[in-house]
Image (spheres, grey):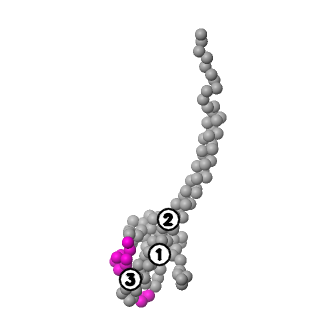
Amino acid sequence: MKPRYSRRSGFTLVEIMIVVALIGMLVAIAIPNFVRSRSTTQANVCINNLHQVDNAIQEWALEFKKNSAQAVTFTDISSYLKNVIVCPTGGTAFSDSYTITDVGTKPVCQKLPASHILTPDTGS
């Protein structure tokens, strides 16, 4: 007796190509969304850091009775910051991430100043 082999076992080339095409389409949809959500998250973290720096400046000014024109440095406010504050888009230290000048001026992100903006206070 001769053994019989079935030619129907396994996947055809067309079936494999369809699966690969579907996976490629899913990846083409997912990667831009991932990149967009990553940059949005980084901007939100940076803005949150700017809020923390501004709050530290205001606390320092209130505690030491400084006016809005008083110059402020990182060493003045470092004790009011709980964690290391750096911009998530490539900052390595506070000095290369944020710029602070005086009590009345909001801190500014050095990495992406056009998109990482601290909104002005609304008064509430």
60 displayed left or right of 2: left
Segment colored magenta: 67-82
User: Does residue 15 appear in this view?
Assistant: yes
Q: Which mark is residue 87?
A: none
**Secondary structure found at label 2:** helix
**Which labelled disc corresponds to residue 51?**
1
State the residue at coordinates (40%, 86%). Answer: 62
**What residue is shown at x 36% (from left), y 75% (from top)?**
78
Which kind of residue does numbered mark 3 sit on? Trp
Question: How far, Cα to Cα, is label 2 from label 3?
Answer: 27 Å
Q: Is residue 107 above or below residue 63?
A: above
- Indicate the position of residue 16 as horizontal and vertical percent values: 61, 36
Give SS at disc 1.
helix
Q: Is residue 48 above or below residue 33?
A: below
The first of marks 1 and 2 along the sequence is: 2
Q: Alpha-carbon distance for marks 1 and 2?
A: 14 Å
Which residue in the structure is indicated by mark 3? 60
Taking the magenta stretch, the answer to whether it contains residue 92 is no
From the image, tell me which residue sits under label 2.
42
Say above or below: 108 vs 6.
below
Residue 69 location (% of width, % of height): 43, 88
Q: Nearer the viewer, residue 90 or 13?
A: 13
User: Label 2 amino acid?
Assistant: Gln
Q: Amino acid at mark 1?
A: His
Q: Earlier in the sequence, mark 2 or mark 3?
A: 2
Crowd band around label 2 with a 10 angstrom C-alpha radius: few (<14), some (14–19), many (20+): some
Q: Residue drawn 62% across and 47% down?
A: 25
Q: Nearer the viewer, mark 1 or mark 2?
A: 1
Kindly report which numbered mark, 2 or 3, lies closer to the viewer in this rendering. Answer: 3
Name the image quarter holding the N terminus. top right
Q: Are marks 3 and 1 in contact (CB under 8 Å)?
A: no
- Judge the density around disc 3: few (<14), some (14-19), many (≥20) Cα neighbours within 10 Å: some
